[in-house]
Image (cartoon, rainbow, N blue to C red):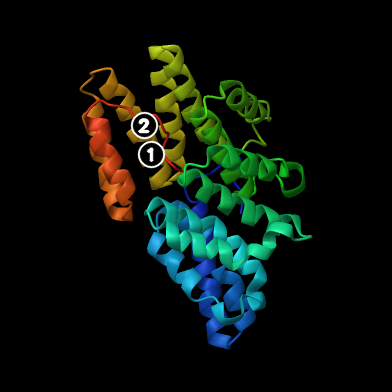
Amino acid sequence: MSDTHGSFGDRYEEAAGTVRQGLEHARKVGSRYWEWAFLGYGYPFYMLGAWDEVLVMWDELPHEDWTQARLAYGTVLCAAVPVCVYRGRLDDARRMVEAVGEFEHSADVQERCYYGSARAQLLLADGERDEAQEVAESVFAERDVLGIGADVIKEAFALAVQAALELDRLDKADELLAIVEQLPTGVRPQFLSAHESRFRAHLAARRGDRDETERLFKGGAGLFQELAVPFHLAVTQLEYGEWLAAEDRAEADPLFMQARETFERLDAKPWLERIAGGRSGTQPRSLPQMG
């Protein structure tokens, strides 16, 4: 699935609805092949915040012989691994990645990218930023093959920029952001535009440019809200709130409250812990572990 500028609000809802209908029909006619194929399309559910549903989809794949549903195992990694990482279930995420370890050297570029993006998620969560950036960049480098709107490419972009910022490689972050900024408006996915605005806000904050920081955080949050992706919106609200709190501004509290409500609903415990630090006005050095 991909997104480009246009009507974004219902796209993930429509995709999730199609998957549910496909699953229902496949099970009705007894087609295991198509049932497993549809179980691989967890990404719309991840984006919509239906995280429990994503993990159910993973659980219902044929783990006794995963090669029967090889494509589904690849595509679902883009959803199930982030869900586990953002819930603090790193061991579960690690087992998912290890289950398809042979993808790392697959002749299929899609399989290599599915594996690489999931592995970069884990590396970043484990604090292995150098390797996380290297792996995420290698996936993003396949954008001309898979398309800039491919889910795995978009996730890899966000991971690569985040790792660069955490490593204080500001030139590298700027280089990656410029790739997205140079894309024509009709080609650039809104998800990437939202991340570009969010990451540019962090760069502006480091320069001490308060007006630009505020404008960019608001812009990124607005784009994520249009996309109707609650987790990414909540993370941006949290980051914006952390910056406001560090500036000793009262506007941080409503943002923390909104972000907390989302994280509670998603059972994203590490992010709830982060809110406590943000409220204290002590902004953590590391950016949130997200794609």
Q: CA distance from mark 2 to mark 1?
A: 6 Å
Quarter of the image for residue 259 reads top left
Position of the N terminus by quadrant: bottom right
Residue at horizontal 57%, vertical 81%? 64
Q: Are marks 2 and 1 in contact (CB under 8 Å)?
A: yes
What residue is pinned by disc 2?
239
Residue at horizontal 64%, vertical 31%? 180
Asked whether residue 144 appears in the rendered view, the answer is yes
Give the percent coordinates (x, y) of residue 19: 53, 67
Q: Disc 1 marks which amino acid?
A: Val
Question: In this view of the protein, which residue sits in the foreground, 13 or 291?
Answer: 291
Q: Is residue 209 above or below residue 114?
A: above
What residue is pinned by disc 1?
235
Give the percent coordinates (x, y) of residue 23: 53, 75
Mark 2, secondary structure of its residue? helix
Mark 1, secondary structure of its residue? helix
Quarter of the image for residue 89 reads bottom left
Give the percent coordinates (x, y) of residue 8: 52, 44
Question: In this view of the protein, which residue sits in the foreground, 220 or 71?
Answer: 71
Give the percent coordinates (x, y) of residue 255: 27, 33
Asked whether residue 148 appears in the rendered view, the answer is no
Residue 233 as seen in the image, left or right of residue 78: left
